[in-house]
Image (spheres, helix red, strand yellow):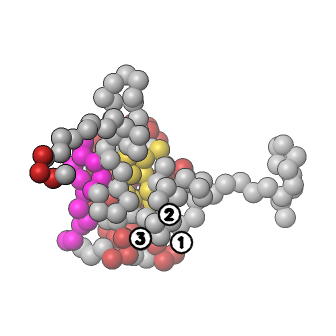
Amino acid sequence: MKGPDHKGNPNKRAPFVSLPLWLIETAAWKHLSAEARALYVELKAQYKGINNGRIVFSTRQAAKALNLSKNTAAALFRELQEHGFIERMICGSFESRKDRKASEWRLTEHVCDVTGQIASKEFASWREGSNFRVPREGQGVSQTGQGVPHRGLYGAHKPRAVPQGAL
């Protein structure tokens, strides 16, 4: 048993990142580069049990954490998406000085805390040569499921004209 922590809380354990054996035995995990695996560990370290779908981690943060270039970090995010480990919920942008936001991610291993969607575990069905489709940078996540528009849930909404005969 561990003694009290520095605040005097009894038996408090240090936080840790858990990678289940069934996950690391999948073909998708074995096909990932070492850098992509390291990025997944960094993303999972940001998961607190209540924020899946709201894991904020930018390309710059990933580049700094892994001591890589921003372009390499962006490629690693794409690799994790193609293998089904993560899904982008909100695409980050620097459209204005006031609206700078990092992308928000969801780990497919866990239930989504934003939409309540069950864990899809897409990586378990990944096969070599059949990567999952990833939206190009600057596009929102597809609307077939729990996707969120490019500007986020509360982004600017432009009214659309309705054809005269449609009403």
Whether residue 142 appears in this view of the structure is yes
For mark 1, give the secondary structure: loop
For the stretch drawn in magenta, the main secondary structure is loop
Amino acid at dot 3: Ser
Residue drawn 46% across and 69% down?
119
- Vertical placement of residue 96 versus 42, above or below: above
Where is residue 120 drawn, in percent x and y?
41, 70
Does the image show residue 33? no
Q: How far apart are the two marked residues, 1 and 3, measured between alpha carbons?
A: 16 Å
Give the residue displayed 21% in from the left and 41% down from the top. Answer: 160
The image shows residue 22, relative to residue 94, as above or below, that is: below
Q: Mark 1: which amino acid? A: Pro
Instruction: Mark 1 and mark 3 in contact? Answer it, CB < 8 Å.
Output: no
Circle 3 sits in a helix, a strand or a loop, which is it?
Answer: loop
The residue where tag 2 is placed is 116
Question: Which element carries disc 2, helix, strand or loop?
Answer: loop
| Pair 1/3: label in front | 3
Badge 2 density bin: few <14, some 14–19, many ≥20, Cα 10 Å = few
Q: Which residue is mark 1?
A: 20
75 or 139: nearer the viewer: 139
Identify which residue, 158 or 2, lies in the foreground.
158
Residue under label 3:
120
Where residue 91 appears, as percent x and y from the top left, is 34, 44
Verify whether residue 134 appears in magenta: yes
Residue range (magenta):
129-142
Q: Does residue 136 appear left or right of residue 110 in this picture?
A: left
Query: Which numbered disc flags the more N-terminal residue, 1 or 3?
Result: 1
Specify which label sits upstream in the sequence, 2 or 1.
Answer: 1
Membership of 77 in magenta stretch? no
| Amino acid tagged 2 | Gly
